[in-house]
Image: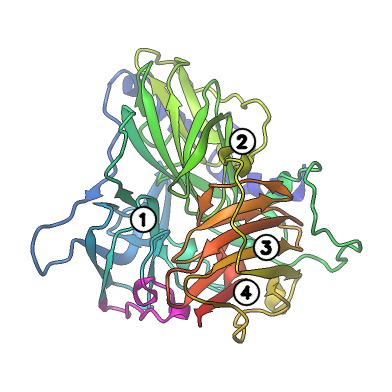
Amino acid sequence: MKRRDFVRLGWATVIGVGTGELHPAIAESLGLRHLSVPRPHPQMPTSQPQATGRAADFTLRVAPTLVELAPQVVISTTAYNDKVPGPLIRTREGQPVTVDVVNDTDVPEYVHWHGLFVPSEVDGAAEEGTPAVPPHGRRRYQFVAKPAGSRWYHSHTTAMLDLHRGAYSGQFGFFMIDSTNDSGLYDQEVFLALREWQYFLSTMDQDEGWPDPNDPMPEKPTTPDARPNGLEVSAPLFSINDKMLGAGEPLRVREGQRILMHLLNAGSQIHRLGLFGHRFQVIALDGNPVPAPQPVAMIEIAPGERVDAIVDMNQPGVWILGELNDVARQSGMGLVVEYANHAQPRPQWLAPPPSRWDYTIFGKAAPHPAPDQTIDMVFEKVPGGPHGINHWLVNGKEFPHEREFVFRQGARYRLVFHNRSDDSHPLHMHRHLFELVELNGKPTAGVKKDTVIVPAFGRATVDLLADQPGLTLFHCHIQQHMDFGFMALFRYA
Ligand SMILES: [Cu+2]
């Protein structure tokens, strides 16, 4: 057993892994009595726009709260409106939106509207000049909801060594912007946010279980870095929405139904999900419809990313939709999927057939117009820097930079992300979408995203049209990497 697994299982034992797939209390809650009572899958509470002229359409109250992840597993965090995820904000594309944020905590907060085209002043990033929501104060955010698709909102405060702030807190929620041409070809729509809880610092890399010797690693240096690795954020508990595997209501389905799953990774680790006997028809990445929807057996989703997939329910039984990693799944990252009239005492986990996640299969073959300028961005790790924490360099410097990164309005940019580190990083550009051009040398077109995983020692190239004037933050979506240097600010000339 690796030391990492020992540490994780040590934690997991507290909540009873070792008795099989589920905690006894959780298994008990899944007993026949419950299974025999058909109940609709609980809808996430929705904040609907209110009609009043001067009132906000939505109000988010940031406050400390308790979350019952499972029977006898209750954690303390801060969240929006005492819910994790926060209320589903749903609106039509092009609609003006007013959100009042009430901050019932002792620290300043920012709410970032991830994937929306909004001005810097309301984007929710201090670095772009958005004003804070003061402690015990309030602030109104007003913007137009665009573009259509699965967006989300979350705290964008700096956390540094406070593992209860920013992305470590429960401050996140779905923000759906409906387009006027929603096909509606599904029977049920579910919102599933993946999360870890009770973060701690460790020298063990969370993603070490997923090395892929087949990766080309074009950015791998010839001489490996011999410095010892520093502290990274790890976690012992996992959930989908606010419940650990088996602790919440199952997703109740009927044979023949089509389920639209809106998946969001609101955590700090990359996750891989499978549902034995089923395929995920991926229709959108980061909320943007893909040119070539494809069925896949496994979905990989990084912090900040969204995947919309339709699953045809054609394998009756009681299954676990779960993390492929056994420890993560057994420590909570999963959801029971229960077909009507197929109740069985225990949900089954079977690993899906081995497969690779590859963004490029959802794209098309098409030439990209030549960019006006190519910007190379090189990312490096400084292992075990100050405080024993890994620090991160963008083109040789930790954030902030001088004026290295400048856009001219209307110009097309090709950004080449060179990941010269042994970790995968989900790189996020605020207020813009970019189009994937190549990933580790594999070309594609038409896949539009706001967050892209650049694999360890890998390279991704994206094209971006600079059409959203204003300061624009770019960063790794892993909170700790962002806080310790992995950030850059683009300015419009
Ligand atoms: Cu990172």
Distance Cα–Cα, label 1 vs label 2: 32 Å
Tell me which label, 4 or 3, sits earlier in the chain. Answer: 3
In-front residue for pair 104/93 = 93
Q: Secondary structure beneath disc 4?
A: loop
Distance Cα–Cα, label 4 vs label 3: 18 Å
- Residue, x 60% and y 24% (percent of image)? 350
Count of picture labels: 4
Badge 4: residue crowd in 10 Å (few <14, some 14–19, many ≥20): many
Tell me which label, 1 or 2, sits earlier in the chain. Answer: 1
Q: Mark 1 points at which residue?
A: 147
The three-letter amino acid code for the residue at tag 1 is Pro
Distance Cα–Cα, label 1 vs label 4: 31 Å
Tell me which label, 2 or 3, sits earlier in the chain. Answer: 2
Report the magenta residues as a range.
119-138
The three-letter amino acid code for the residue at tag 3 is Phe
Q: Secondary structure beneath disc 3?
A: strand
Ligand 1 image position (quadrant)? bottom right
Asked if the magenta segment contains residue 131, the reply would be yes
Q: Name the residue under label 2.
A: 324
Q: Name the residue under label 4.
A: 484
The three-letter amino acid code for the residue at tag 4 is Phe
- Which circle marks residue 417 in the picture? 3
Q: Secondary structure beneath disc 1?
A: loop
Q: Nearer the viewer, mark 1 or mark 4?
A: 1
Q: Kindly check if marks 2 and 4 are in contact, taking CB atoms under 8 A apart as contact.
A: no
Horizontally, residue 252 falls left or right of residue 423, namely: left
Q: Where is residue 310 in the image (x, y as percent from the top left)?
A: 43, 31
What main secondary structure does the magenta stretch of the protein show?
Answer: loop
Q: Residue furthest top?
A: 341
- Which circle marks residue 489 in the picture? none
